[in-house]
Image (tube, grey):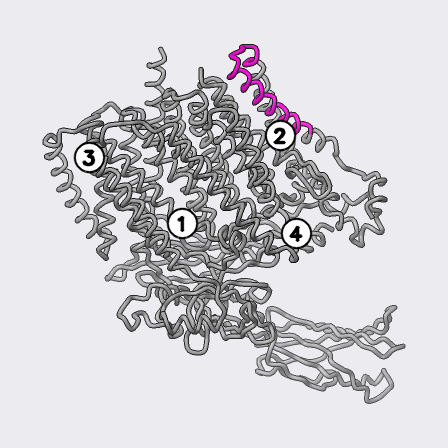
Amino acid sequence: MNEPIKNIVFTGEWLWLGNLGHAFTIIAFIAAIASAYFYFQHESSKNNSMLQWAKRCFQLHAISIVGVFVVLFSIIFYHRYEFYYAWRHSSNALPVYYMISCFWEGQEGSFLLWLFWNALIGLVLQRSAKEWESPVMVVIAFAQIALGSMLVGFHWGDFKIGSSPFDLLREQRPDFLNIPILGQLGVENYLQVFKDGNGLNALLQNYWMVIHPPTLFLGFATAIVPFAYSLSALWRGSDRGWIAPAHIWSLVCAGILGLGIIMGGFWAYESLSFGGYWAWDPVENASLMPWLIMASAAHMLIITKATGRHLFTSHLLVQLSFWLVLYATFLTRSGILGEASVHSFTDLGLSGQLLLFLLAFLALALVVVLQGKQRKIALFSILAVMLIPMVLAYSIEAPTSVETFYQWLKGLGTCLFFGWLIYYIYVLYQRTKMEMSDERMDSREFWMFLGSMFLILSLVQVFAATSIPVFNKLFGYKTAVPTAADYNKVQLWLAMPIFLLMSLGYWFKFRETDIASIKRPLLVNTVLTLVAALLLTIGFAIEGYQFILFLVLTTGVVVFNMVYGIKKKKTEWKRWGGNISHIGFGILMMGVLVSSVNKNILSSTKEGIDMAPEVDQKGNQDNKGIKFNRENQLLYKNKPQVLQEYTAIYLDDRKGLGVDSIDKYFRVAFVKKNEQGKTIDSFVLEPKTQNNPKMGLLAEPSTRHFLHTDIFSHVNYESSMDRKEPYSNFRIDTIGFFRPFITQTGKVVMTIDSIRRTKETAGLKLVLAIKAKRLGDSVWLRPEFMINEQTGDFEMKAAENDRFGIMANIINLQIIDPNPAHQNILFVIQTGEKTPVWDYVVIQVIAFPWINLVWAGTIIMVIGFVISVINRIQKQKKLMV
Amino acid sequence: MKPFHLILLVLAGVGIATVISMYGNTTQYVAFPDAKRIAIENPGKAVHVVCKLNKAKPVIYDAQTNANRLEFYGFDSLNNESKVIFTKPKPSQFEQLEKMVLIGTYQDDHFLATEILSKCPSKYEDAPGAVKSSK
């Protein structure tokens, strides 16, 4: 089958465009290798011409990446469906501003985006890294080689490197060339059939999805820079010059990644129907994990910079956050999460390669940290021997006959991996440990260190829970993925000490603090916090000791940092960065608490089935089952329904714009009245459903934003989803001309007025004209009856009238007198009336109080990061001069 | 040196305790009979059951009677059959679901699911419809 296809000249393909893109990919790949080589040579020989070559090569690499980007965009823009990527991820109907979203629906596009950001970061580093350029750029170029390999798309039999975005549709899906219609057109003209693409996932067609993924990816990409500085420092021996730039980049990364994560939450809140912004979904966790560690690392770097302590922990955390980025990529892109996540990504069969990618960086780190050639060589050969089977075991489907052997191999590989990791950490510790005097509890570094440790504890729980699908795969377990409640229970308590340390930390000085001098301000702050928290507890109506404690501590974060800033930094706004970030984080967490604890399901109802007891025999509150019941209410069209303080009325529905729109908007009015019956608030929400042929019913919520609360609504079911017969009340009459007969309810009176006979090729066609009368109004119904005179078969076609809501159908004929002139025919006529339909929607309405604090806190936090970064860069420049 | 190391040790302890308690809380994917047993031993504990819809028996959902009740029969991975009641509206294309994960507890004669995680068979796949519509 493959042979003849090769000889066919396909018409209308723009193969040159794909070849151009592929050429750019290969140039970029080779330029990255060359750049890494020259930078490496420069670092070892200090030969300046090498540096020039390295710079040029990297610039060539960056230009080529832009080239790949432009080519892929052109393919999508010009709807070149001969390319699989365009066919798979876009369609003719896709607006230009969503075309960019096609890049992150597919893996190849995502890797391309990552390459693009890395290339940009590389160009920035070429200008800013100064004497650190060579070693840092070796690491960046190494990453580009690894990422580039994912896009090259080489195939040798079953073995493949990467997956090219320029693969052809007919090569990816040869089965499409066998579809019957091509038999007539000729296979070479297949493009005349594939005039439209498969389309972009409907969930991605949202403006937040244009901005959230690139932000998140930029956050991921920047995580490599502190990592690169850490490795460079280890490579050059114990040099502390890396800490300042690594710290700046860690702040950049934490700021952008934090923003990207919350943007994703905002997208989920605005356009997904789970009713919230955070669900502890593995994909969300995957982006949270590097952030937690990057935030921790940023603090650790401050300690190391100020006091020289904890150099080992700084190195470790900076590297860990980058490995977590790689791990996140592996989790979300390898398909291992499968059913554990609502965000499923297709598996391109790259798991083995992704794993190799992760291991390659670990190997790089190990090589750098070790000293002495023999050890490197020995270790490398051992690893090579050990790792190859492990990667093979993951990437190739195990034949059943050797399954146990594969399991064993996997287990061995895993043990070796952890052994290697522990050995690496041990060597790193040996190299970076330092003898220091005892840590003083009255020093700022002590409290900061403790705070960082709690961030790590938080990570440990998220990591352990998110990795369950990985452990299942590794050891063949069948552990179920934890629910959001399992996470909340733990994280609630882990967050509290962090808040406490965020409040107190700033008041201590590095090395040692005169406790007497801070006693008074701390006392004043505590009193202020308690007063503010008391007011807030009443204002927000928070109940439950753990939530009140949480609120007190988040209030503390805001108060302590605010007072510290005012007292110590006054109007020197550039020094406010850290405090502002802390304040923003405090507000963010306060918003998280209030909007989730006091979330009010307006549509909850008392009716419903008997549920599991809310309190079990031991008297413990059962918080797992009961809460989720009765969350939806049915609203009949035009019938007001009380939803707590609101009265909701389902007004009508309308189709989305565009002829073939599959969107349906339900207009639901909400009215709130005060005790005097005066309307104090009214608004209309338009939750949307999309009957997507590929994904089923997609519900897009509609939300009314107030300053202090959000009213969130989405449709879960609607009347047109019921499968109902359009007509009922059937009645059969056998009747001749001009004799009145009625429908079942007697509301409509009908008479057969005339008949028209036409001879057609299929036989004799009879059309009756039936006059239907109702209260002085009348309409005509024209049912058809077709007789095939040879076979005697007949066909009927009913007539309907929407205004009267009736139908009539000729079921049979009875000929009494064969002479047609006498018109002695009786017709067996079935009449029916429209089934009465009450349109309804099943809707969920939730009030989220003070959710705006979440968004406001995020913005404040990011502003804090920006100020810190500006301040640090300026300080650094002053030092240079 | 001492108190500092002590603190590190305590933190490590907390970390280990957190992880152990979390793993202690997780459930395996179970079959219906196990779910029944767990519901007696440990009332209110939510379990996960991988389930396949029994298409031969009716799926009952009448929004106008109760919008928050879906009743159907399903098979677990060992082919045990059980009645299932779900406390939310019927998910879209429910009858076409190949496999779903039920989260909930066993009660009397039925499994009471408060959550259904499903993967639509056509989700993200190249549906044959895509070829048809391109004509």
Residue to which mark 1 is pinned: A278
Secondary structure under the numbered disc 4 in the rendered image: loop
**Is residue A868 placed above or below A547 in the rendered structure?**
above
Residue toward you, A701 or A254: A254
Circle number at residue A550: none
All told, the count of numbered labels is 4
Separation of residues labelled 3 and 1 (CA atoms) = 36 Å
- Membership of A45 in magenta stretch: yes
Q: Read off the magenta span.
A: A23-52
Separation of residues labelled 4 and 1 (CA atoms) = 29 Å
Q: Are marks 4 and 2 in contact (CB under 8 Å)?
A: no
Which chain letter matches label 3? Answer: A
Secondary structure under the numbered disc 1 in the rendered image: loop
Secondary structure under the numbered disc 3 in the rendered image: loop
**Mark 3 or 2, which is nearer the eye?**
3
* First reached walking from the N terminus: tag 1 or tag 2: 2
Q: Are marks 1 and 2 in contact (CB under 8 Å)?
A: no
- A495 sits to left or right of A800: left
Separation of residues labelled 3 and 4 (CA atoms) = 61 Å
Separation of residues labelled 1 and 2 (CA atoms) = 34 Å
Q: Assess disc 1: are there few (<14), some (14-19) or many (≥20) residues with their C-alpha within 10 Å of its C-alpha.
A: some
Which chain letter matches label 1? Answer: A
Mark 2 belongs to which amino acid?
Answer: Val
Residue to which mark 4 is pinned: B126
Residue to which mark 2 is pinned: A70
Residue at position x 22%, y 34% from top? A562
Residue at position x 55%, y 37% from top? A383
Residue toward you, A448 or A829: A448
- Name the outermost residue toward the right: A790
Secondary structure under the numbered disc 2 in the rendered image: helix
Place of residue A478 in the rendered image (x, y in percent of width and height, measured from the top left): 49, 59
